[in-house]
Image: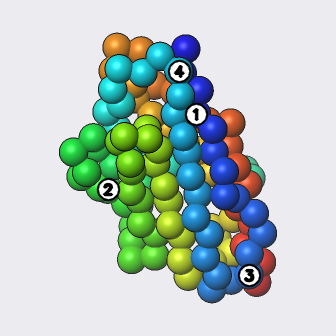
Amino acid sequence: QVQLVESGGGLVQAGGSLRLSCAASGSIFSINTMAWYRQAPGKQRELVASVSNYGSTNYADSVKGRFTISRDNAKNTVYLEMNSLKPADTAVYYCYAYVSVAGPYWGQGTQVTVSS
């Protein structure tokens, strides 16, 4: 069994910054892709950013230049540094990890609210 625990969400004013963290624990041999998704009220869950186990990154167009994803493989942890936040970034942010052999796992979600 694998658990993903997120932290770092909260309320911030437009233009501010937040840093999300997600730590994986449990029966982990290795983790392939780690990513952050988000879901705003009434909208589908969407990919925000992903990072491979080799460090290759991918970003949604809406966050390019503002968000940075990184990971610490030794700690099985992924981070999302969010700068220049906008009200449109308000959503529940979910951590995702594809664990070798075990498959995909999701975190419980952390709320990010950006006020105008």
Residue at mark 4: 26
The residue shown at (35%, 20%) is 29
Residue at mark 2: 58
Residue at mark 1: 4
Residue type of the residue flagged with mark 1: Leu
Q: Quadrant of residue 108?
A: top right
- Name the N-terminal-most of marks 1 and 4: 1
Q: Is residue 78 left or right of residue 94?
A: left
- Name the N-terminal-most of marks 4 and 3: 3
**Nearer the camera: disc 4 or disc 3:** 4
Q: CA distance from mark 4 to mark 2?
A: 26 Å
How crowded is the residue under tag 2: few (<14 C-alpha within 10 Å), some, or many (20+)? some
Q: Determine whether the residue tagged by mark 1 lies in a helix, strand or loop.
A: strand
Q: CA distance from mark 1 to mark 3?
A: 27 Å
Q: CA distance from mark 1 to mark 4?
A: 9 Å
The residue shown at (55%, 14%) is 1
Q: How many marks?
A: 4
- Expressed as whole percent of the image width and height from the top left, the position of residue 64 reads 39, 71
**Nearer the camera: disc 4 or disc 2:** 4
- Expressed as whole percent of the image width and height from the top left, the position of residue 96 reads 50, 38
Residue at mark 3: 13
Q: Determine whether the residue tagged by mark 2 lies in a helix, strand or loop.
A: strand
